[in-house]
Image (spheres, rainbow, N blue to C red):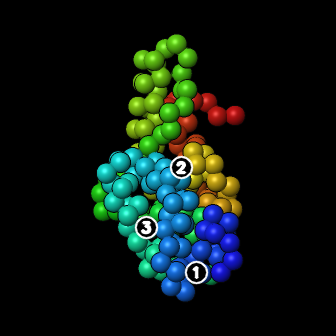
Amino acid sequence: MTGSSDERADAELLAAHCAGDPHAFGEIFRRHKDRMWAVAVRTCHDRELAADCLQDAFLAAYRRAGSFRGESAVTTWLHRIVVNACLDRLRRMRPTVPLPDYELAARGDEHAQTELRLDLHEALDRLPEGQRIALVLVDMEGWSVAEAAEILEVPEGTVKSRCARGRAALAQALGVERR
């Protein structure tokens, strides 16, 4: 094998893991654990549940590394596994999705910010799961529509329509006029 773990691409590391390299998957985990943790926390809205989901996801990735076809980036493949692990657990309980800590109201009015954040959480919790997850991936995580479609394993048009319907429902629930 050429180069150190730091120099090797994710796909090379995954191939090395499949070939029996005992350290390769650990490097993939080290590189991506923080971002995947953020995805799990934002998807689950519960740190303990997110930790369980992340553990499930990395175990699944470790075991199913041989199924990686290389049609997407390893990080996209991992993201899909994390989202699916979260969705599996959330389907068994009341689904929730957190909102990032954005400045949602006047800068000096912490009470108004907190109130608006709570209203947004409540409105987001009432969205159908597909719309909620699409909005989290595209609007909160910053994935492109194409990347979100790949992660969710649905057509791009489905992600676009879920986001549009989700945004419209949030605007209506919050009493915001849409242009």
Give the side of residue 173 with respect to residue 88, left or right.
Answer: right
Mark 3 or 1, nearer chain start: 1
| Picture layout, residue 122 above or below residue 162 | above
Mark 1 or 2, nearer chain start: 1
Mark 3 or 2, nearer chain start: 3
| Mark 1 lies on residue | 16
Q: Nearer the viewer, mark 3 or mark 1?
A: 1
Quarter of the picture containing the C terminus is top right
Tell me the tag on residue 136. Answer: 2
| Mark 3 lies on residue | 57
Task: Give me the residue at 67% from left, 57% from top.
Answer: 145
Mark 3 surroundings: few (<14), some (14-19) or many (≥20) residues within 10 A: many
Which amino acid type corresponds to the residue marked 1 in the rendered image? Answer: Ala
Label 1 to label 2: alpha-carbon separation: 33 Å
State if disc 2 and disc 1 touch (CB < 8 Å). Answer: no
Mark 2 secondary-structure assignment: helix
Q: Quadrant of residue 121?
A: top left
Which amino acid type corresponds to the residue marked 2 in the rendered image? Answer: Val
Q: Nearer the viewer, mark 3 or mark 2?
A: 3
Mark 1 secondary-structure assignment: helix
| Picture layout, residue 81 above or below residue 104 | below
Q: Position of residue 60 (x, y in %)?
A: 43, 74
Label 3 to label 2: alpha-carbon separation: 18 Å
Give the side of residue 73 with respect to residue 67, left or right.
Answer: right
Residue 105 visible in the current orientation: yes
| Picture layout, residue 91 above or below residue 140 | below
Q: Position of residue 172 (x, y in %)?
A: 53, 36
State if disc 2 and disc 3 touch (CB < 8 Å). Answer: no
Q: Nearer the viewer, mark 1 or mark 2?
A: 1
